[in-house]
Amino acid sequence: MSASMPGARSCCSEIITEREEKASVAIATNLPFSEWGTVFPDPRLVAAIVDRVTFNAHILQTGTQSYRLRASKKTLTNKRETTSAARDRGEPGRP
């Protein structure tokens, strides 16, 4: 679920509230709690969500970059290098 979708923010909050103390919730994010206000613009909503998510929680911080971001950057770099090499050889570019 993307938090940029209309209604996704409140839906996420509702899911967390409904599952509170009933079932497990797994959340993966590259944002620290201090930056959740960029996703959930209401400071009270952020405080409530962080409170519910962290109560009796097991928080795992890997301290690593997203492998998806790393792979995307590598793909982009490879494409640029391939395009540059083709241009150096005088090959026409792709549309």
Image (cartoon, helix red, strand yellow):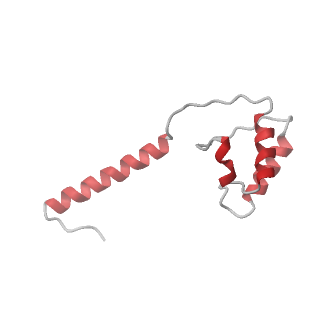
Query: Is residue 1 shown to the viewer in this render?
Result: no
Locate residue 12 relative to residue 17 in the image: left or right.
Answer: left
- Residue at left offset 80%, top offset 33%: 55
Locate residue 19 relative to residue 86 in the image: left or right.
Answer: right
Quick check: 67 above or below 3? above
- Residue at left offset 76%, top offset 41%: 50
Residue 39 screen position, x and y as percent: 67, 54
Return the residue nearer the eye: 95 or 55.
55
Quick check: 93 above or below 76? below
Residue 12 screen position, x and y as percent: 76, 51
Which image quarter is the C terminus in?
Answer: bottom left
Query: Is residue 39 shown to the viewer in this render?
Result: yes
Q: Farthest residue toward the bottom?
A: 95
Residue 6 screen position, x and y as percent: 71, 64
- Residue at left offset 17%, top offset 65%: 91
Quick check: 2 above or below 59? below
Q: Farthest residue toward the left?
A: 89
Residue 26 screen position, x and y as percent: 70, 38
- Residue at left offset 65%, top offset 54%: 38
Return the residue nearer the eye: 69 or 51.
51
Q: How many marks?
A: 0
